[in-house]
């Protein structure tokens, strides 16, 4: 079974290995520092893992309070850090919304190369495993290669895909896809959009249009408007998000490429400063390397490994 809990756990741990090493490596010195020295070290490593100054302060405060109360063994330090991170990430977890109206519509947006097309295929795979029948939509009509990529990935994860010719209007593709999904009884529609720089106004307006096309047809906006964020860009993702939010009204995040960075701590300031939950984390290039974000499991994999 591809999704049995151990395999899931192993993938998550493996994907977070680099961040874990950057966080815990420097703390595990042979002498096992305690007290102020440890807290200073901890501050350094949290900042180094891109946790950001505000959230680092919150975590340090919580760890300090826990350690003041009792022993400062390595085990106690790990537990305190685990609890502190769980607290700052408490509101980061949310399940995918299924309103009960079919098809559920999920739109994926983000800058170039953030991992949108791969994530769409990975999510489709997770949904099919749960018995949900998804239709993928190639609304990235900008490049022929983008359409081919989605079609190939759809084939690999054995789901259907609707595509027009390169250069077609993305709104028209989405319109067709939603009508088709309704008549053919799909449970979910996953829209892959072209990568764009948030500063390119006409391209951002195009995203707004795709949202409106869906809204007119469904009588409600797409149920999820997901920003796909590349974890390797760290906290810069925060500045990308604002204009995407303005264009489509984001409902959540997918954070990709956590396996490719030691700065995975950036998930903390990204989700907190945007007040957006993380629906999935990508921990590898493989199509099975996407996990629903669960705070407890994420923090445990990060701290305990
Ligand atoms: N290591 C790793 N690579 C990933 C992950 N997610 C995506 N990638 C890789 O990132 C690269 C870009 O992924 P795409 O899915 O094509 O990105 P995109 O956002 O659709 O790109 P554009 O459509 O060009 O904007 C590919 O090589 C993917 O395999 C991940 O979680 N981990
Ligand atoms: Mg793409």
Image: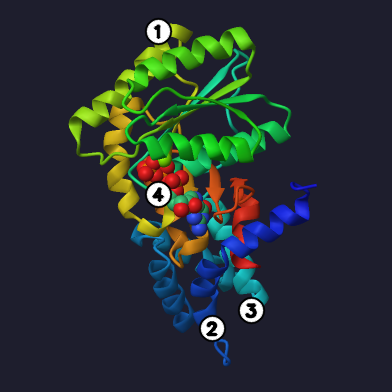
Q: Quadrant of residue 181?
A: top right
Residue 228 seen by the camera: no
In the image as oriented, which residue stretches furthest toward the bottom? 31
Residue mark closest to the camera, 4 vs 3: 4
For the residues labelled 3 and 2, say whether their Cβ atoms are less than 8 Å apart.
no
Find numbered disc 1 in the image and state the secondary structure of the residue it sits on: helix
Q: Where residue 134 sits: x, y (%)?
A: 61, 25
Observer-nearest of 126 and 82: 126
Determine which residue is flagged by label 1: 216
Q: CA distance from mark 1 to mark 2?
A: 60 Å
Q: Residue at x 34, y 39 (%)?
A: 195
Q: Residue 103: where, in percent of width, then height?
A: 58, 16
Q: Give the mark toward the camera: 3 or 2.
A: 3
Residue 69 rendering spot, x and y as whole percentages: 60, 70
Tell me which numbered mark, 3 or 2, is placed earlier along the sequence. 2
- The residue at 46%/68% (across/down) is 262
Marks 1/4 in contact by CB < 8 Å: the verdict is no
Query: Quarter-wise, where is residue 50 in the image?
Result: bottom left
Q: What is the spatial separation of the Cα atoms under label 2 and label 4, in whole angstroms? A: 30 Å
Mark 4, residues whose alpha carbon is within 10 Å: few (<14), some, or many (≥20)? many
Q: Of callouts 2 and 4, which one flags the residue occurring earlier in the amino acid sequence?
A: 2
Numbered badge on residue 74:
3
Mark 3: secondary structure:
helix
Mark 1 sits near ligand 2, with its Cβ under 8 Å away: no
User: In the image shown, does 240 or 44 lie closer to the viewer?
Assistant: 240
Q: Which numbered dot is residue 270?
A: 4
Q: Circles 4 and 3: CB distance less than 8 Å?
A: no
């Amino acid at each position: 079974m591809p999704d049995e809990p151990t395999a899931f756990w192993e993938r998550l741990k493996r994907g977070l290995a680099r961040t874990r090493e950057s966080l815990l490596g420097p703390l595990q010195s042979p002498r096992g520092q305690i007290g102020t020295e440890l807290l200073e070290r901890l501050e350094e490593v949290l900042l180094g893992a891109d946790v950001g100054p505000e959230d680092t302060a919150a975590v340090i405060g919580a760890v300090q309070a826990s350690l003041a109360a009792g022993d400062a063994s390595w085990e106690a330090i790990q537990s305190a850090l685990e609890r502190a991170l769980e607290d700052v990430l408490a509101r980061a977890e949310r399940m995918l919304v299924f309103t009960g109206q079919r098809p559920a519509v999920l739109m994926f947006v983000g800058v170039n190369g953030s991992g949108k097309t791969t994530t769409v295929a990975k999510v489709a795979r997770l949904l099919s495993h749960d018995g949900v029948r998804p239709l993928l939509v190639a609304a990235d009509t900008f490049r022929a290669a983008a359409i081919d990529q989605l079609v190939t990935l759809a084939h690999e994860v054995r789901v259907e895909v609707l595509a027009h010719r390169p250069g077609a209007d993305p709104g028209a593709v989405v319109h067709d896809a939603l009508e088709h999904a309704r008549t053919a009884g799909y449970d979910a529609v996953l829209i892959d959009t072209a990568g764009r720089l948030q500063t390119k106004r006409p391209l951002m307006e195009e995203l707004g249009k795709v949202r409106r096309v869906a809204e007119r047809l469904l009588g409600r906006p797409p149920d999820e408007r997901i920003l796909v964020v590349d974890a390797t860009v760290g906290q810069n993702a925060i500045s990308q998000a604002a204009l995407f939010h303005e264009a489509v009204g984001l409902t959540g995040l997918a954070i990709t490429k956590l396996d490719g960075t030691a700065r995975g701590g950036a998930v903390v300031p990204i989700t907190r400063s945007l007040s957006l939950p993380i629906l999935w984390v990508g921990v590898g290039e493989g199509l099975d390397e996407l996990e629903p974000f669960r705070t407890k499991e994420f923090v445990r994999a990060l701290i305990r490994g």
